[in-house]
Image: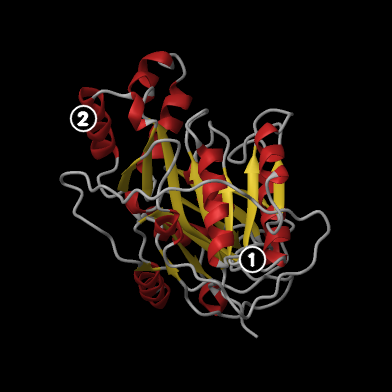
Amino acid sequence: MEQSAIPVIVLSGFLGSGKTTLLLRLLQHAKATGLRASVLMNEIGAVDVDGTMVSSASATQMLERITEGCLCCSKKSELASCLERLALMQPDVIVMELTGVANPEEIAEAITEPIIIGKVRLHRIVTVLDAEHALDYNSIFSSDRELIRTLRKQIEVADFIIANKYDLISNRTADKVKQLIRDRNPAADFITATRCEIDSALVFAGISPSGARRQPVISGMRTAIATGGRVLPEKLPGSGGGKSPAPAGKPAAAMQPGAAPTATKAPSSYSRIRTAAIYPGADAAGLTRRQFEAFIGGRGNNCMRAKGYLPFGKDGSLMLFQLAGKRLEWSPSSYEGEPYFVMIGIELDESKVKQEWARFTARK
């Protein structure tokens, strides 16, 4: 039986913003509504205090933890294997809580690794903002440009932004926080909250329990318990109102070395960050590396990242290519599956990319 890719909800936000509190509320909602949720938690330190708290409060969710590093950099190599293990449990949704210094944009790239592409898909990025301190970050961390960039990206790529600790700020500060969010990401849904008391159904919109999936019996599984609240999203002036689900691309089936991909039903995605996966097949025949680079380079700012495996090595061997910004690098690879490449961008239209690829290869 064909299985759609499992949606992944990413929880982002700086240290102390309230992500774990939100996670507990989401897990309570998932349990109450019959959603089978798995959890992946990342802690930059060696001691996973938050993960212990979630474990001690839970009974039906599968929990994976990654400590002593950040999923978007030093621990990126572990992300795919963790997600693969969670996907094997066939949950209805995977909720991923990032460390406070993680860039969620990098996570969108990481979930297109060969072993998990088609098994999971990015559904929504939720950023929790500490409303009490958000306006001070630029001055506090002025000497660390990379951290400032990460904090900005947490806002810019979010689909939902929760301004937490809103009860602790003045009306004047509240107006400045709204302006900050409007300047960085006017398209996001904006929610104000105290202790992350929100309507969790908003985060899970578009995901429903699947009767076709059976939860395996796993020893040591626990269930999350938290208290919940309901706060409807507020639209910032000039944000353009609500958004309807936009079509995501058709994910490829799980890849095995030497196996051709099998298409699965295209799910809906609420995330502004979208991917376009292309399996060139015979279209790659006769195409040179320079020609391919011309195609990728012609995407402009719409493509934030690109990577994949293509037969441009010696004697047609597969090489790994990675595009970040305007820098494109090639390196040898031991990958033995079908050639493919993935493009990642905000509001990326996979069907349009595929049409452009078809026209491009027809002219070669």
- Count of labels in the image: 2
Q: Residue at x 56, y 80 (%)?
A: 263
Give the camera-side residue of 346 and 353.
346
Q: Residue at x 21, y 26 (%)?
A: 171
On screen, residue 235 versus residue 155, left or right, reads left
> To which quarter of the image does residue 35 belong?
bottom right
Q: Which residue is mark 2?
A: 175
- In the image as oriented, which residue stretches furthest toward the left? 238
Q: CA distance from mark 2 to mark 1?
A: 40 Å
Q: Amino acid at mark 1?
A: Pro
On screen, residue 8 versus residue 152, left or right, reads right
> To which quarter of the image does residue 223 belong?
bottom right
Instruction: Tell me whether the residue at label 2 lies in contact with that at label 1, contact meaning CB atoms closer than 8 angstroms.
Output: no
Q: Position of residue 95 (x, y in %)?
A: 57, 53
Q: Amino acid at mark 2?
A: Asp
Q: Establish if 322 lies above or below 292.
A: above
Sooner in the amino-acid sequence: mark 2 or mark 1: 1
Q: Residue at x 70, y 75 (%)?
A: 214
Q: Is residue 329 visible?
A: no
Q: Residues within 10 Å of mark 2 (few under 14, many from 20)?
A: few
The label shown at residue 259 is none
Q: Which residue is mark 1?
A: 91
Q: Position of residue 314 (x, y in %)?
A: 68, 59
Figure quadrant of the C terminus: bottom left
Q: Establish if 6 lies above or below 210.
A: above
Q: Position of residue 319 (x, y in %)?
A: 64, 57
Classify mark 1: helix, strand or loop.
loop
Give the camera-side residue of 100 and 61.
61
Q: Establish if 3 lies above or below 339.
A: below
Classify mark 2: helix, strand or loop.
helix
Figure quadrant of the N terminus: bottom right
Give the camera-side residue of 66 and 47.
47
